[in-house]
Image (spheres, grey):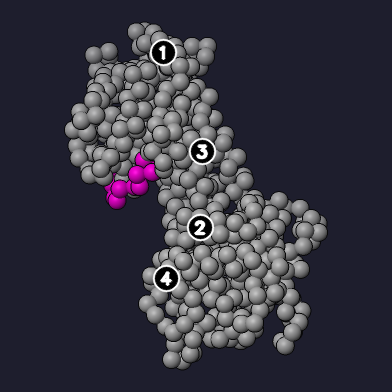
């Protein structure tokens, strides 16, 4: 099994995906163990002094003015975990919790948190055992980090609360730890706080969304090209020299992908035939501009994620010169903004895909295709309601595009008076990504049927490869009405797991 070594210099997005989704093992680098020990010496020295130090010998948040005596400090650290594990609502997904735990371990291993090496090792052991703490949908305001979600993870390290075992069964965390020979941690000064105070949940969801969107944007280029073919449109608008004079890199990449899909098609260029068109509709002609803007948005979001992956997010932090200083680096604004930005881009990509689908189904705008791509229109309804479903998905995505990061609800007796709502931005982006997958799947279903109905004209080799692969995947072609939901589910799976992109790349080579 692949092993990810966590050192002091951060981790990569591929490391996060490997641990969160593929169950990769985690090991502590020797540099991390040394840095953890050195930082802990600093914290221990400060804990022995009479002067109060935030997070070491004081309360937290609005209660930071109280100096805590030595005999109460272990209780203080346990109490912050227990009291902050206040999440409610449905459980979040296993991959999100694993990403959350792994990214917290990444920051702990930076040597800036003051956590003992044995606590970090326990975090790695829990991940490697496949133990996943129960984390709930609601509880994070995205400032002071993802407090409630991280607290539920820390609670499991203490042998309290519930967790899901590797068999998928939820049980008391103490039982699961015992079965895997993992001793619960006994928290000392600052450690409870250090386990809670980071942007790890929102960052993990950002990294996973970027991975999913990378496949979806390629998929949307493919379905846009298939729709152009089915509508007998022109591929001249995809010429590289046209996109070079407006040099947005994402736009050029999307146009190049569409052109690659359409190479050697006999369906393109018929816009001047029986029903002449000067130019195709915006939803067809401007596909690279819309998808390209989303790609450039992803590039910015990826830059933010890379910076965050290289960060040590905690408060207070242990500095190399021995100071332990309070700071505001836990504020989730940088991550929250790009999570919201991606939801906007995803909604617009879904919107333009839905417009192409609607055009394919309308006999007045489809340039010779049967109404609703039906076998016997009137007797058959064809894909009429598939487009309704697609429209409902797009409508929800437009609502999800309303930014969470523009909201702020003060908390902690006005000490934490401006928050990022980054966790909420991440949660709605996950829904948007799922919806975008379904929207692209509906366009794929309609466009492949439309291409097949163009008898006497041969589609591009890449298009033929898609049609052959999607039919083998259980998505049926033209014919009388049938139960559509299974076909749509099969198309969704075909898009989600990357088989659509694989089918095209088997002909074109790697897409951009």
Q: Mark 2 packing: few (<14 Cα in 10 Å), some, or many (20+)?
A: some
Tell me which label, 4 or 2, sits earlier in the chain.
Answer: 4
Helix, strand or loop at label 1? It is helix
From the image, tell me which residue sits under label 1: 37
Helix, strand or loop at label 3? It is helix
Check the image and report above or below for 185 versus 508.
Answer: above
Magenta-colored stretch includes residue 89 = yes
Residue that appears at 39% across and 31% down: 25
Mark 4 → mark 1, Cα distance in angstroms: 57 Å
Tell me which label, 1 or 3, sits earlier in the chain.
Answer: 3
Tell me which label, 3 or 2, sits earlier in the chain.
Answer: 3
From the image, tell me which residue sits under label 4: 487
Tell me which label, 4 or 1, sits earlier in the chain.
Answer: 1
Q: Where is residue 222 in the image (x, y as percent from the top left)?
A: 60, 63
Is residue 274 rendered to the left or right of residue 398? right
- Depth check, front residue: 415 or 345: 345
Q: Mark 3 packing: few (<14 Cα in 10 Å), some, or many (20+)?
A: few
The image's mark for residue 14 is: 3
């Amino acid at each position: 099994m692949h092993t990810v070594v966590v050192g002091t210099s951060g981790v990569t997005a591929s490391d996060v995906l490997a641990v969160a989704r593929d169950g990769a093992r985690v090991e502590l680098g020797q540099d991390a163990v040394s840095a953890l020990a050195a930082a802990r010496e600093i914290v221990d020295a400060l804990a022995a002094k009479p002067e109060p130090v935030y997070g070491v010998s004081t309360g937290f948040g609005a209660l930071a003015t109280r100096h805590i005596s030595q005999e109460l400090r272990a209780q203080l650290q346990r109490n912050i975990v227990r009291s902050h594990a206040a999440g409610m609502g449905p459980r979040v997904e296993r991959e999100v919790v694993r990403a959350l735990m792994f990214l917290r371990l990444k920051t702990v291993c930076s040597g800036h948190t003051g956590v003992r090496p044995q606590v970090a090792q326990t975090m790695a052991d829990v991940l490697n055992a496949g133990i996943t703490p129960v984390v709930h949908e609601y509880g994070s305001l995205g400032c002071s980090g993802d407090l409630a979600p991280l607290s539920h993870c820390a609670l499991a390290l203490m042998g309290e609360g519930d967790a899901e075992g590797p068999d998928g069964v939820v049980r008391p965390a103490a039982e699961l730890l015992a079965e895997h020979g993992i001793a619960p941690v006994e928290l000392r000064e600052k450690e409870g706080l250090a386990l809670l105070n980071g942007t790890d949940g929102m960052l993990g969801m950002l990294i996973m969304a970027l991975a999913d969107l990378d496949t979806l944007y390629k998929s949307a280029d493919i379905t846009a090209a298939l729709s152009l073919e089915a509508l007998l449109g022109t591929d001249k608008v995809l010429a590289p020299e046209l996109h070079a004079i407006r040099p947005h890199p994402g736009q050029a990449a999307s146009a190049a992908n569409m052109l690659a899909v359409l190479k050697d098609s006999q369906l393109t260029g018929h816009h001047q035939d029986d029903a002449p068109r000067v130019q195709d509709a915006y939803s067809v002609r401007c596909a690279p501009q819309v998808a390209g803007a989303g790609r450039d948005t992803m590039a910015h979001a990826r830059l933010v994620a890379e910076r965050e992956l290289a960060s040590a997010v905690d408060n207070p932090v242990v500095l190399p010169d021995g100071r332990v200083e309070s700071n505001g680096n836990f504020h989730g604004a940088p991550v929250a903004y790009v999570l919201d930005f991606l939801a906007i881009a995803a909604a617009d990509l879904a919107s333009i895909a839905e417009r192409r689908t609607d055009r394919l189904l309308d006999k007045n705008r489809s340039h010779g295709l049967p109404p609703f791509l039906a076998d016997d229109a009137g007797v058959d309804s064809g894909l009429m309601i598939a487009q309704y479903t697609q429209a409902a998905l797009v409508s929800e995505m437009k609502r999800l595009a309303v930014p969470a990061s523009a909201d702020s609800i003060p908390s902690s007796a006005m000490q934490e008076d401006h928050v990022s709502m980054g966790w909420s931005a991440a949660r709605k982006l996950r829904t948007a990504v799922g919806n975008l997958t379904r929207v692209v799947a509906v366009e794929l279903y309609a466009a492949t049927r439309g291409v097949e109905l163009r008898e006497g004209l041969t589609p591009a080799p890449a298009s033929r490869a898609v049609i052959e692969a999607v039919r083998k995947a259980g998505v049926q072609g033209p014919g009388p009405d049938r139960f559509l939901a299974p076909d749509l589910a099969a198309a969704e799976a075909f898009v989600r797991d990357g088989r659509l992109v694989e089918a095209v790349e088997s002909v074109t080579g790697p897409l951009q």
